[in-house]
Each structure stands twice: as structure tokens, then as C-alpha cells.
Image (cartoon, rainbow, N blue to C red):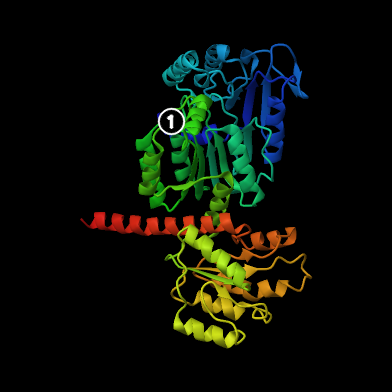
Amino acid sequence: MGSYTHQQLEEFLSPRNIAVIGASPNNQWFGNILENALKSGFDGQFYPVNPRTDEVRGIRAYRSISDLPDGKIDLAILLVKSSIVLETLEKLRKKGITNVLLVSSGFAETGEEGRRMQDRLRQYCTEHGIVLMGPNCLGFMNLQERVSAFCGGAVEGELIPGAVGVVGQSGATSEAIITKILKKSVGASLYLTTGNEAMLTVEDWMEYLVYDESTRVITCFVEEFRDIEKLRQVAFEAARRKIPIIILKIGRSAKGRKVAISHTGALAGNDNIVDGLFKQLGIVRVETIEELAETAVIFSRCGLPKGKGLGICTFSGGLSGLYADLCEKYGIELPSLQEKTIQRLEALLPEFARPDNPLDVTGSGFLQGLNEIVRSMLEDENLDIVAPMFIPPQDKDDPVGFLNESYMSLIDTAEKPVVPIVFREMTDYAGEYLRDRGLYFMEDPDTGFKAVSHLIEYAGFIRRFREGSSSASCC
């Protein structure tokens, strides 16, 4: 973590008393900070600093940094012009405040002069032991500790603690990512925006998350990396701990690389090299925000399969063909069923049904329930993941619910991941029904099968990694 220890960053992310320098009733930033803190359940205090008022949004304000209470402030958020950032840091340092979130823009993203300003900022923080996040970032949410120091206004969904860590070099884009994840009700451990990364980089925060006890899945939006060697070390430790790293990285196109440079002042590199590096390190690369969120959810709710074979159970020949095409598109193997499985299914299904994979139980083959059908597939040694159909009930009294309930008890003891595929539009009741059981479910087949392919590929990487580590330790 650069020159910072894990404990320093842990303290940075867990403030109870936060000074906001430049808090004003005339812009939305301080209001957003207060609203996000309230939604997160934060029970600490804010200390706005504004030289022209004694109160901001109903909270007592301080005219200067020197007026702040001694030995009280854990974190300072800076909402001041870039031209006075250095002198503001000096005043904070004299007050004993060394944890700083710098929201202000106007640094490396603006060009050569901005880069020189950022270099001076970095030098000052290095010389004086200041822990700095930013500049040009929105801040962070530590949902496990019910802390928010975040000035964005676009995060939606309930701020619930969970196992997914989110890091973004772009504040606004990462707001869309965290919103997608929260709305899938998996929760987040930490949500961090890095901006221009004068001090703390995306690699630093990835390293922190690998060692964070609450985080089991790491997701990132990246414009460019700054320390490839640290990325390698982080990925190795993540693999050792079986913590998947999922990254949405822009810059495949010339336009994308140009945007990355202009946004945070990063240097955009060769994307083919990035692809190869990710495969070597076991990093899951995704192409869209939706794919990132879907992949994060499947990793947070499913164990890793022991092999590559997927078994699909539906009641439509057309859907069987559609799913088979998507599996081929994403490199998912659909192995043939074992002979013993075929015989069991022939006894369970109508005589005109033809047991295969994908399995079409036909329009009448599921009417007595799916429990024995799903059990047969779970016991098939050729299959490592089973994806049965799920018909969303409207409420607890909807008669279609018995079809799902018939096999739900099998999931609790199954050693294989079970991924229900939703047929027809999902209902609020059905979504809660599945989430309460901690299940990943496939609502959109395209993104769903892509997420399944990532789960399978990552599981294969982990098996190879462990075999390699075991061989190395024996030599």
C-alpha cells in the first residue's frame, strides 16, 4: 500500500469525526455528504469549515481550520479550489490532521500545469506523512463500519453491508456499478473512488481489500494501472485466498484510451498486453457495467464448481436451443448425461421426452414437481453446475410456487452450484424468495451465461494455481 500500512488505511476508512473544508449551502457537495452518511447509518459528527457563516445545513460551522477542536478530527474532506489545496493541507497538518480526502479537481486531468501541481501535492504528502485519497474523486463508503465520506449524489439502493468491494477510478461510473450491485441485494463491504491517484492508487486499494476480512469479491473500474508489479502481487495473494478480482477496464479503442488520459491524467497502455496479463493472473475481465455486477453476484452467492460441465433443465425445446447457443458463445461445456441419469429421467418424464443436455422436460414433464429431475442431474458425475428452470410466483399463494419448492431443499445440501434460470418476468416476491436463500439466479440469459462462464474459468484457474503452488512447494 505504498508507504501506508494496512492499519493506517483502516483508520482512514473508519472516521467518527469528519471536518469538511469548504462546506457551503451554495452547492450540492456537502448536502450529498450528509445524505449519504445518513443512509449509511453513520453516527459520527461533521464539522463544516466556512469563513463566511456560522452554520451550514443546520450544523455549526467553524470559520477556520484553526478553530476546529484539538485532537478530535479523524478525517478532513477538502472541497476547496485547487490553487489553495497545498496551503489548506499545511493548516490541517499544523492542527494534527493527516487523513485527507481531496475531492477538488484541477490537477493532472487538466494538462501539464495540473500535473505539476499534482506532483507538488504528492511531494508534500510524502514529506509530511499525509494519507491522501484523490484528488478529483468522490470519496468512499465503508458499509461494514456504517461510515460514509462520499459526496456523489447518484448511488441508489439500500446501503447494506456485504462481501463485494468496489473500487473505481471514475466516481460517476463507479456510482452506476455500486448501484447495480446494491439493487441485486448482495451488499458491499467497501466502495472506494480513487480519482487522479496522487498517492493512493487502485492497486493500493485492491491490496487493502485482499486483506480486508469482510471482502470476498473485488470489483474495479479501471482507466489505467500505475503499478503492474503491485498488481501481480495483489492478484497472487487474491488467488491464494480464493478472492476473485473482476475488472472493467476501458481503453480497448483509441477513443477509449484518449478518454482515460483526459479524465484522470493516466497513461493508457497496450490493451492486448492487458488481456494477456489478466489471463495470466486469473483476473476476470468484463466488458460492461451489467456484466461486472452480474459476475460479482454469482461469485458472492455461488461456490466454485469442481469442473467445467453445466447441466440445464428447462421445459421448452426452443429455450434449450437458445441456451445451447449462448453456452457455445461463451465457451461453456454442456456434456452428455450419464447413462444412469438418462434411465432415471426416462422413468420420470413423459415417453415422448428425450433426455439430453440441455434437458427439455416438455410442457407436461414438470407438473409433478422437479425434485427428482433436479436430483438426477445433481448426482450426474458429468455435471458440475446445475441450472434448473424457475417460474417466478406472484406471491406465496401462487400455485406455480410448488414447482420451485419441490427442488429447493436439495440446494441446501448440494455440493454443486445451483443456478435457477428465470422463466418469464421476475416478480418482487420471487426475487426476495431467491435472495433470502442466498441464491444466484439467471434473469437475463446473455449476461447470466457470461457470468457462469467466468465462474467456471476462474474455478479452473484456481485449480491450476493450487496445483502449481503445491508443485513449487514440493521442489
- Please provide percent x and percent y for residue 427: 73, 60
The part of the image, by quadrant, that contains residue 64 is top right
The image shows residue 239, relative to residue 305, as above or below, that is: above
Q: Quadrant of the C terminus?
A: bottom left
Q: Residues within 10 Å of mark 1 (few under 14, many from 20)?
A: many
In this rendered view, identify the residue nearer to me: 286 or 5. 286
Q: Secondary structure at mark 1?
A: loop
The image shows residue 2, relative to residue 304, as above or below, that is: above
Q: Quadrant of the N terminus?
A: top left
Q: Is residue 303 visible?
A: no
Q: Is residue 138 left or right of residue 464?
A: right
- Please provide percent x and percent y for residue 193: 55, 33
In this rendered view, identify the residue nearer to me: 352 or 306. 352
Picture mark count: 1
The part of the image, by quadrant, that contains residue 267 is top left
Q: Which residue is mark 1?
A: 268
The part of the image, by quadrant, that contains residue 73 is top right
Q: Is residue 30 visible?
A: yes
* Residue visible at 52% across and 29% down in the picture: 259
- Please provide percent x and percent y for residue 353: 59, 82
* Residue visible at 76% across and 74% down in the picture: 399
Of the residues shown, which amino acid type is indicated by label 1? Ala
In this rendered view, identify the residue nearer to me: 213 or 233. 233
Q: Is residue 320 left or right of residue 272?
A: right
* Residue visible at 69% across and 45% down in the picture: 157
Which residue in the rendered view is the most extreme toward the left?
Answer: 475
The image shows residue 359, relative to residue 251, as above or below, that is: below
- Please provide percent x and percent y for residue 439: 60, 62
* Residue visible at 51% across and 36% down in the picture: 10
In this rendered view, identify the residue nearer to me: 231 or 19. 231
